[in-house]
Image (cartoon, rainbow, N blue to C red):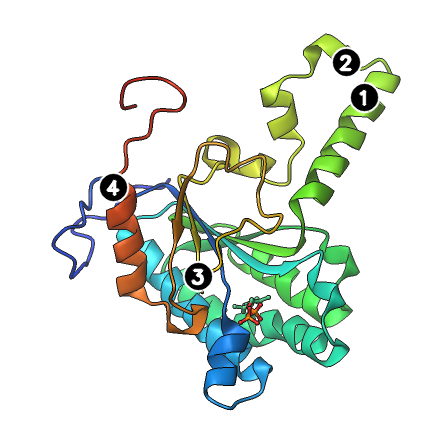
Amino acid sequence: MFGKKEGSSTSNAKLDPNRIPDHIAIIMDGNGRWAQERHLPRVAGHKQGMQTVKNVTIAASELGVKVLSLYAFSTENWKRPSSEVSYLMQLPIKFFSTFVPDLVKHNVRVMVMGDITKLPQGTQKAVNDAIADTADCNEMILNFALNYGSRDEIIRATQQIAKKVAAKEISVDQIDEQLLSQNMMTADLDKLADPDLLIRTSGEERISNFMLWQIAYSELEFTDVYWPDFDRHSLEDAIVKFQGRHRRYGGLKNN
Ligand code: FPP
């Protein structure tokens, strides 16, 4: 599983194909502004953003990324106008109805973090079907955050652990980093749960409740590019910047 691609296709001479980050997480931002600048309705930006998700997924898989986590809908996004929420809820249906064969072709497995039971039935079905249809794929995981919020995730993990303590299944002393990680929504990603690189598009420089536990040691990259304009080259540029960083994890030497 997860073999590095031989001769990954890249046009970026600065990119080292042997040091591709295993896990890239992206806060996809700027769809609305992209649309507004073109005098289009906001949802046109989301539609174009969905196309970007396809392109970036293929690019990441061809570069040898092992996990691509995408913030598609947050626990706070319900506050948007209901017409926009409805549109966003249709996107996974549109996306998977056309894209699952490409995902299978590129050996990409779909996973989800977030409480999808609160999504409309049709959206849940599209997501669950895509998870099932790609269950045997093993080159890259496309990890969608849907109705996901990091504080919600941490609360749920805490509740799960507290229940185990109350039931005397574990003692308080057994609560450690590993146990917390095992109770996060990324538990199935195991050693790949923590992003090496977190990218946020559109010039905003904040985390917005995304993977707070998992990004403790991630490299952060903020780009002014709006998500609908983000492409393979933008991804490669971000990876080149990542490759120029020295990750020390609190220590003194490169790891
Ligand atoms: C943020 O831009 C974007 C979102 C809240 C939605 C992201 C969704 C997609 C990119 C499509 C997802 C595709 C699938 C398959 C689920 P914004 O609307 O906040 O932009 P703004 O800050 O310019 O208003």
Q: Secondary structure at mark 2?
A: loop
Q: Which mark is residue 170?
A: 2
Q: Residue at the location (60% across, 69% down)?
A: 92
Residue annotated with mark 3? 201
Amino acid type of the residue that numbered disc 4 sits on in the rendered structure: Gln
Residue annotated with mark 1? 164
Residues marked 2 and 3 touching at CB (< 8 Å): no
Amino acid type of the residue that numbered disc 2 sits on in the rendered structure: Ile
In this rendering, is residue 73 above or below 176? Answer: below
Q: Nearer the viewer, mark 4 or mark 2?
A: 4
Distance from label 3 to label 1 (Cα)? 39 Å
Q: Which mark is residue 6?
A: none
Report x, y in % for residue 146. 64, 57
Residues marked 2 and 1 touching at CB (< 8 Å): yes
Report x, y in % for residue 182. 62, 28
Report x, y in % for residue 8. 20, 53
Q: Residue at the location (16% across, 51% down)?
A: 7
Toward the bottom, the furthest residue is 39
